[in-house]
């Protein structure tokens, strides 16, 4: 792991143009369940039964109950050390932006400003009829739009819906133009988001993957780490600091 951590840190320092792609593993380290794992919430509910357009239209009671549970769970979690480090790296000019499959808003809560949410957000609800947006907390008591009387629903991408065009276009541009593409906690099984690492690689980026299980893109990666995201990013941050100290030392020696 140490060699790969140092390789990643050096690539980030040299590029200063890193795109970060995050999946469910990023959120599980904050205590949110992985909805796709064998012991996640999808074990109790089939995705197409409750997180779908069909459920929204035909079984709204159970649909609303399921999403009220998910929205309520957000109040019990906070950004983890990985989220906070990514926000810090953005402030330091190392990370250009984040592409996320997560809908929990934890990147923004940690302070990240450039976040492209491919699957929407649970932090808001919107009217299915007129598009009016309200804070997600209002969904607990009211599922009717106060403007047109339409049905409110979480502002997430449901099964049967397309990804938001703006977020997908911005993510594709970021993947095409970055110097480093860093995948954190995604199995890379959901299309078309899982095509972004390959797009980055084709356009000359160095690709690194931190995930507990193998992905189909591992063969293309410049480095793969199967470890905790938080621990890995902390190790990368220490390596970045060491590179900075080394550069300052060399600069001081050159001026002597």
Image (cartoon, helix red, strand yellow):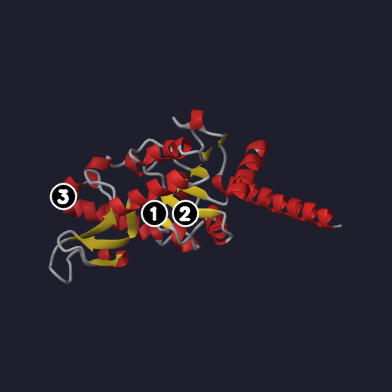
Q: In the image, is residue 247 above or below residue 188?
A: below
Q: Which mark is residue 97?
A: 2
Please state which of the two labelled residues, at mark 3 or mark 1, is closer to the viewer.
1
Kindly tell me whether residue 123 is visible in this rendering.
Answer: yes
Instruction: Please name whichever residue, 10 or 37, is drawn nearer the observer in this view of the structure.
Output: 10
Label 3 sits on a secondary structure element that is loop
* Residue wearing tag 1: 116
> Disc 2 versus disc 1: distance between alpha carbons?
8 Å
Quick one: label 2, few (<14), some, or many (20+) residues within 10 Å?
many
x, y percent for residue 142:
21, 67
x, y percent for residue 88:
57, 59
Quick one: label 1, few (<14), some, or many (20+) residues within 10 Å?
many
Instruction: Please name whichever residue, 66 or 185, is drawn nearer the observer in this view of the structure.
Output: 185
* Residue wearing tag 3: 59
Label 1 sits on a secondary structure element that is strand
Which residue sits at x=28%, y=57%? 155
Residue at far right of view: 256
> Disc 3 versus disc 2: distance between alpha carbons?
37 Å
Q: In the image, is residue 135 above or below residue 59?
A: below
Instruction: Please name whichever residue, 1 or 138, is drawn nearer the observer in this view of the structure.
Output: 1
Q: Specify the quadrant of the image occupied by residue 244.
A: bottom right
Q: How many marks?
A: 3
Q: Specify the quadrant of the image occupied by residue 186.
A: top left
Q: Earlier in the sequence, mark 3 or mark 1?
A: 3
Q: Is residue 244 left or right of residue 100?
A: right
Q: Earlier in the sequence, mark 3 or mark 2?
A: 3
Which residue sits at x=27%, y=52%? 66
Mark 3 in CB contact with mark 2 (< 8 angstroms) = no
Mark 2 in CB contact with mark 1 (< 8 angstroms) = yes
Q: Quadrant of the N terminus?
A: top right
């Amino acid at each position: 792991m140490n060699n790969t951590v140092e390789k990643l840190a050096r690539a980030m320092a040299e590029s200063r143009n890193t795109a970060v792609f995050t999946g469910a593993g990023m959120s599980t380290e904050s205590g949110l369940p992985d909805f796709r794992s064998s012991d996640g919430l999808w074990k109790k509910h089939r995705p197409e039964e409750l997180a779908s357009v069909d459920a929204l239209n035909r079984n709204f009671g159970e649909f609303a109950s399921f999403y009220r549970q998910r929205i309520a769970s957000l109040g019990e979690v906070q950004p983890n050390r990985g989220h906070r480090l990514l926000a810090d790296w953005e402030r330091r000019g190392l990370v250009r932006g984040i592409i996320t499959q997560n809908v929990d808003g934890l990147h923004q809560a940690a302070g990240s400003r450039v976040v492209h949410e491919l699957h929407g957000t649970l932090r808001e609800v919107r009217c299915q009829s007129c598009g009016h947006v309200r804070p997600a907390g209002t969904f607990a008591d009211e599922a009717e739009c106060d403007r047109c009387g339409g049905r409110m629903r979480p502002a997430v991408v449901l099964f049967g819906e397309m990804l938001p065009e703006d977020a997908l276009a911005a993510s594709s541009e970021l993947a095409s133009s970055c110097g480093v593409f860093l995948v954190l906690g995604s199995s890379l099984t959901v299309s078309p988001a899982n095509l972004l690492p390959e797009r980055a690689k084709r356009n000359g980026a160095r690709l690194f993957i931190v995930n507990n299980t193998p992905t189909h893109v591992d063969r293309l990666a410049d480095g793969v780490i199967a470890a905790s995201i938080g621990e890995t990013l902390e190790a990368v941050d220490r390596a970045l600091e060491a590179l900075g100290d080394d550069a300052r030392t060399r600069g001081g020696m050159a001026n002597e």
